Image (cartoon, coloured by chain):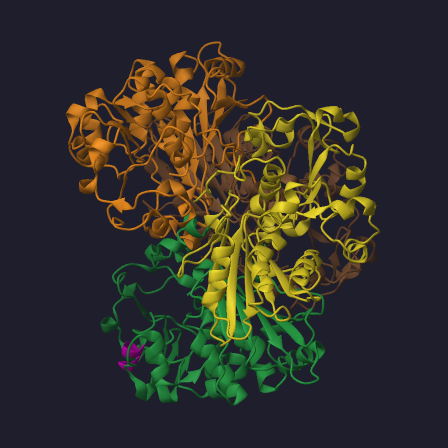
Chain colours: A orange, B yellow, C green, D brown
Amino acid sequence: MRLAARHPNIKITALIAKGHAGQMLAQVFPHLSSLDVPSLVTSDEVDWDEVDVAFCGLPHGTAHAEIAKLPSRVKVIDMSADFRLRDLGTYAEWYGGDHGAPELLEGAVYGLTELYRDQIASARLVACPGCYPTAVLLALLPLVKDELILPEDIIIDAKSGVSGAGRSLKQNILFSEAGEGLSPYGIGSHRHVPEIEQELGEAAGQPVIVNFTPHLVPMTRGELCTSYVRLTGKTTVADLRAALTSGYADSPFVRVVEEGVIPATQHVRGSNYCHIGVFADRIPGRGIVVSAIDNLVKGSAGQALQNFNLMHGLDETTALEQLPLFP
Amino acid sequence: MRLAARHPNIKITALIAKGHAGQMLAQVFPHLSSLDVPSLVTSDEVDWDEVDVAFCGLPHGTAHAEIAKLPSRVKVIDMSADFRLRDLGTYAEWYGGDHGAPELLEGAVYGLTELYRDQIASARLVACPGCYPTAVLLALLPLVKDELILPEDIIIDAKSGVSGAGRSLKQNILFSEAGEGLSPYGIGSHRHVPEIEQELGEAAGQPVIVNFTPHLVPMTRGELCTSYVRLTGKTTVADLRAALTSGYADSPFVRVVEEGVIPATQHVRGSNYCHIGVFADRIPGRGIVVSAIDNLVKGSAGQALQNFNLMHGLDETTALEQLPLFP
Amino acid sequence: MRLAARHPNIKITALIAKGHAGQMLAQVFPHLSSLDVPSLVTSDEVDWDEVDVAFCGLPHGTAHAEIAKLPSRVKVIDMSADFRLRDLGTYAEWYGGDHGAPELLEGAVYGLTELYRDQIASARLVACPGCYPTAVLLALLPLVKDELILPEDIIIDAKSGVSGAGRSLKQNILFSEAGEGLSPYGIGSHRHVPEIEQELGEAAGQPVIVNFTPHLVPMTRGELCTSYVRLTGKTTVADLRAALTSGYADSPFVRVVEEGVIPATQHVRGSNYCHIGVFADRIPGRGIVVSAIDNLVKGSAGQALQNFNLMHGLDETTALEQLPLFP
Amino acid sequence: MRLAARHPNIKITALIAKGHAGQMLAQVFPHLSSLDVPSLVTSDEVDWDEVDVAFCGLPHGTAHAEIAKLPSRVKVIDMSADFRLRDLGTYAEWYGGDHGAPELLEGAVYGLTELYRDQIASARLVACPGCYPTAVLLALLPLVKDELILPEDIIIDAKSGVSGAGRSLKQNILFSEAGEGLSPYGIGSHRHVPEIEQELGEAAGQPVIVNFTPHLVPMTRGELCTSYVRLTGKTTVADLRAALTSGYADSPFVRVVEEGVIPATQHVRGSNYCHIGVFADRIPGRGIVVSAIDNLVKGSAGQALQNFNLMHGLDETTALEQLPLFP
């Protein structure tokens, strides 16, 4: 809403909510009280003739049913996980149930903007990546594709701010529990793993298993992935840097930072940027790739809007020009 | 820089720095590395023919000397305290020295946008208010003017995030010192007091002494002032609310929140908004006015840009349309 | 538990829980996993013959019923609000229902240790004050008693860390909601008001109405009250300081800080100390009293233990010797 | 000071400071204002006949000179890095200069309590480990010793709170810079690397090179190391857990947490505990070891006091019984 409300080509015709239907947006999000938008309604109350594009932010496992009900002329930009995994068995295994709209899955495009621009531009249904996969894949996918790193020896130590857990009421994300503390969670079992492995596996041309260990960090926004990789053959760390730099030369939001500069989440806060840094490892033959995003922007709503722009032939940066908010 | 770089009518022709002259902006502020701007220079290196407007963010007590050197055709928007106080004696008393450019002071306008629009529009030199005075005066000045509250019984309990102290190296603003802690500071002696008293005094038509007690809060951005006031005669809290609501009806950035809603700094974060709420006091005949701003936006750079817009006949909101960043 | 488990005269014979009954303490509080204590049970499962003293930390409105069931030989130290208010009507008004054990209320003692030592020492049932009342009353009660300040013109601007809201699941205390933000709450309606007014009123010998405005601060522990008071007759701020200093000369946990020092919550964190500072107001005839505590220690469990010590003829500081944890 | 002042066998006879000499401790650390201790002096002013043990917390590179001046009968517990590295060349390389007291180095003992108890007990000079090495070595040293993990493939992703940087004035540890942000630092060049490699190398019987990548986390206290290891031969993750559990059976402060429990810094905050968890990696043949400490306690002053206890035949836990402060 924060970004879309300022998009010159977007008119907000309906705002759907479940528990909050009937309320004004300002009651749920007082920071948006200056906006003149429709009040919240249930999906049944929407006049879909007025809608060209639907942005969906439903919980995983519930989005597919709602999206299946939409008129086929409505383009869909989904931020749930429901259309990210191409294998129905993998979906059922990780999300605890059968997929309700396998027929839609086939046409869905994985919305990692920088790497799937063409497919996104012509898609009806775009499945925006999870926040972690966005940070991980932007950093590693080009390296696996170019066979610069070994796909079987990738260790991803990921760190996320608390907003990654959403606004639901859970004890571990209370201020007094999460504040001034740090811990891993979901070790080996985080739902973003299959997404990462799907994309890396496709790039590698073989099944890939990665170590992915997320940590909960006492900050609201921001995600940083420190990926430990093994270089192939005579590849050097400079080769990694060169591949990423040239690969993202035409991508306004992905910046490979200069040598010696270290990515930091506070330097992308509130923006759609992804900063990537490449570093030598003390252990010979290994490298470190660090990627930082704002999980709520490039990791979610910002990338959704970026995909919207692509799908409508607009400049990719429209409504995403905001610079990072620092300090 | 964050805001100005996206302003359609601003071209950044020079960036002046002292200690950092010779560096690229990105070295000092990595979050701005995507900007294509000139590198930092000393003021001597600037070709002033290229400059129409100077935004000054120098330390108090040093701005007046630098501003005095500027060609008179250059408009100046000053964010220091040097041109806020109209009385030279008061300036000397609170800022520890004689004023170096009293001749400029005369033409300077106090840049509290919503209350001095006409004067700002035609000024050459605008002295943007301090962050605290902005939050306090937007809340109280109309009430004193309209004789709705007693000017001799105003208690302002102010709270600010740590960025209010700037980027200078002081022990009390280290993360481990300020984090997870709260304390008042500068009790009775904060330099924003004379500014508040000057403006309230002028509105009251008599000298005014206020209680102003600032507190340091463990957050980066945000400022909230809880003002405890005594109502005049038959004035009610509803009268206060009505006066503020109508007074700011044409001010896009000042929002008197609905009854029952409580202003919060997180609801204006990163934006130029000021939220004001009015509440009854349990003590009969008294009221509470709560005002919240982002100290770095409405309390500083945002208001500066808003004044720039006024001074150039632009829509007041140009480049300030960003909605608050929440969470 | 943190403090009691290290008390030389306390043996923990039973730990009562509702939802968590059947679990080990370490499952609910992993930081206490090193303790060798009984697992959690319901109150029905307790062998009360083994119990001499019960520390009660039940929600307001539910404690009185549970306490009424206890054998009369069991001393009770209650941290709920159920036995703090001596007037049944006031209790019903603020806590939304009739009191279930009025007969116990009569013998209950208000457990503000420093001010009611004698009564506490001989009580069977001690009602420990709320966190805010502790900080407020330690600062103001002696001043009202000595007629140094006017009871009808007391403005208390209170600030608390988020742990004051407990561990219950509420949206406003999620990390991403409360973090990096500040706002007042419960303006004029906070349940600690009647407690404060009861005690100040008794000291004043007349009904007292105060302004009490609490604010939620983005930190876990700590509470600071800035009280704005009007001095009586020829009273000076030095008189306030002198009264507090001599009044607390024999109170090891209340420290009137030296002139020029400003209390800060981080300087009492994790400890049972209360720091009080007295300051002149710019407005003649007024003063400012600042008091800081750790809301979970002096504001709750620490004071409970301090009362336990008094009730058993032990040194008041037993098991409370821990110094503040800074940084 | 916080811990030592409550130690039954310690009498503080002198407090040495440089810049603060002449001041009272309470002026430098107001949270310790309740202590009755000598005021701060320079080292020249100390009557060393009154001193049996010196705790040294001097900056790296300056401690050796000061310690060399002490009477040889004074036992020394050093928290700087000056006596941790046994190889003078390594010291010079990492700490930028020749060692000033090589003769003392020979008798110095590396003070990782749980692993060098005997040597510490009889030492005159104990070099307490750095905070990171403490967390890393407690987790990994027994595993390398027992040949359960490969010493040439150890990746340590470390995260520390900001207090690890001390109280010195650096821009990156200002509240507004470090708050709400996360980044790696000192990639491949952190001074704790040689310490870790020295100890692991000695255990492995061969030189060891590790990946050690520290991150700065927006919290004050706490350190968590996520170590990614490759298992030897038929070793399983259960073997790692068994080795650590039995190895620390008699170590009161090191707790191998139960299966399924994940270490978190908030669960050891303010205490001398180290929590260690062992987890399977999705990549076959690999494991993950997570260790958490409070960097200022077990990572520094707490371990120093623990060593003091050992050196004086006291119970290892004396004055360290405080339970973690949560929340």
Q: Position of residue A219 (x, y in %)?
A: 47, 44
The image quadrant that residue C25 belongs to is bottom left
Q: Is C69 in the magenta? A: yes
Q: Is residue C153 above or below residue A68?
A: below
In this picture, residue A18 sits left or right of residue A261: left
Q: Nearer the viewer, residue A204 or A304?
A: A304
Q: Position of residue B79 (x, y in %)?
A: 68, 43
In this picture, residue A180 sits left or right of residue D104: left
Residue drawn at x 49%, y 21% as measured from the top left: A287
Residue drawn at x 17%, y 41% as measured from the top left: A44
The image quadrant that residue A85 belongs to is top left
The image quadrant that residue C192 belongs to is bottom left
Q: Is residue A117 above or below residue C312?
A: above
Decide if residue B35 is in sight here. Answer: yes
Q: Nearer the viewer, residue C145 or D219?
A: C145
Decide if residue C6 is in sight here. Answer: no
Q: Which residues are magenta?
A: C64-70
Q: Quadrant of the C terminus of chain A?
A: top right
Q: Position of residue C242 (x, y in %)?
A: 69, 80
Q: Nearer the viewer, residue A112 or C324?
A: A112
Q: Position of residue A128 (x, y in %)?
A: 32, 28
